[in-house]
Image: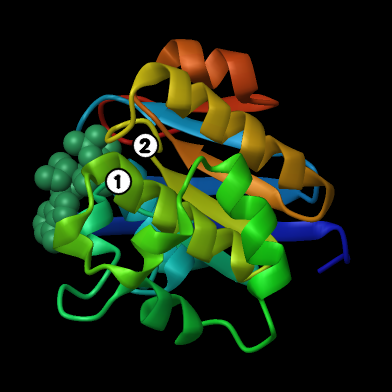
Amino acid sequence: MEEDIVLQIDNLSFSYKKETPIYENFSMTLKKGELFTIFGKSGSGKTTLFELIIGSLKPQSGTIEKQSLSLIFQDPYNSFHPTFNIIEQIKDVINYDFYENMNNYLKELSLDESLLYKKPYELSGGQLQRCSILRALLMKPKLLLVDEPTSALDNIIAYDVMKLLIKYLDSCAILLITHDIDLATWCSDKIIRLDKDGKQ
Ligand SMILES: Nc1ncnc2c1ncn2[C@@H]1O[C@H](COP(=O)(O)OP(=O)(O)OP(=O)(O)O)[C@@H](O)[C@H]1O
């Protein structure tokens, strides 16, 4: 895989049940600096694609090659273990001295540092989602998989968050799932539409 390609999917086929294929010979290439959106109705296969990329599902045929990735989930309460505070769960996945970087991100994400010493249930959905964005950025991924970043955020913050993520396109690529066509049109280099049967 060329160095600037962060995700290469070739001839991917996948079905949960033989008679209803979700993907048939699906291919895409995502390079550093690009933001693509996967757009489609509920049930069209968007989350399935993320699970295939992460490796929690295996394709029946085809190949997926990728560089290091991190994820921002739709439901921030699923992103963190309920019994540990946020900072411990950031330390678990970062293996460099991240405090200087973190202070810059905290400002840009409108997050108060004291929130990081709380447990997930003590934060609002929006605060927790911004914590999951913080953790994802601190991992310095080459590929950022973003599932509906706007769901737990109000509109103004949502666009601010996308603006913040777009800043990091210098060093990574973003694959975004959203139901918000206005957001997709505003921020994407390319929109990949899945039809009702999940075919490109
Ligand atoms: N574990 C599973 N076993 C069987 N079928 C599944 C499973 N997970 C998803 N499906 C089916 O596969 C199809 C694609 O699901 P997927 O969750 O990828 O869609 P989606 O586009 O992400 O939907 P949404 O926008 O509602 O999140 C749906 O018809 C769904 O019912």
- Residue 20 vertical position relative to residue 89 in the rendered view, above or below: above
Relative side of 88 to 138, left or right:
left
Q: Position of residue 33 (x, y in %)?
A: 80, 43
Q: Position of residue 170 (x, y in %)?
A: 84, 47
Q: Nearer the viewer, residue 122 or 94?
A: 122
What element does badge 2 sit on?
Answer: loop
Res 64 quadrant in image: bottom right
Query: Label 1 is placed on what type of residue?
Result: Gln
Residue at 27% x, 36% y is 152
Other residues around mark 2 within 10 Å, as few (<14) / some (14–19) / many (≥20): some
Looking at the figure, which quarter contains the N terminus? bottom right
- Residue placed furthest toward the top: 182
Identify the disc placed on residue 196. none
Residue at 33% x, 23% y is 154
Other residues around mark 1 within 10 Å, as few (<14) / some (14–19) / many (≥20): some
Q: Position of residue 132 (x, y in %)?
A: 41, 58
Relative side of 62 to 58, left or right:
right
Relative side of 40 to 72, left or right:
left
Residue at 22% x, 69% y is 119
- Residue 136 vertical position relative to residue 90 in the rendered view, above or below: above
Q: Is mark 1 within 8 Å of ligand 1?
A: yes
Identify the disc placed on residue 148. 2
- Residue placed furthest toward the front: 114
Residue at 69% x, 54% y is 104
Asked whether the beta carbons under mark 1 and mark 2 sit within 8 Å of each other, the answer is yes
- Residue 167 vertical position relative to residue 189 in the rendered view, above or below: below
Query: Label 2 is placed on what type of residue?
Result: Glu
Q: Position of residue 137 (x, y in %)?
A: 60, 60
Q: Nearer the viewer, residue 165 or 85?
A: 85
Q: Mark 1 sits on what residue?
A: 74
Q: Nearer the viewer, residue 173 or 96?
A: 96
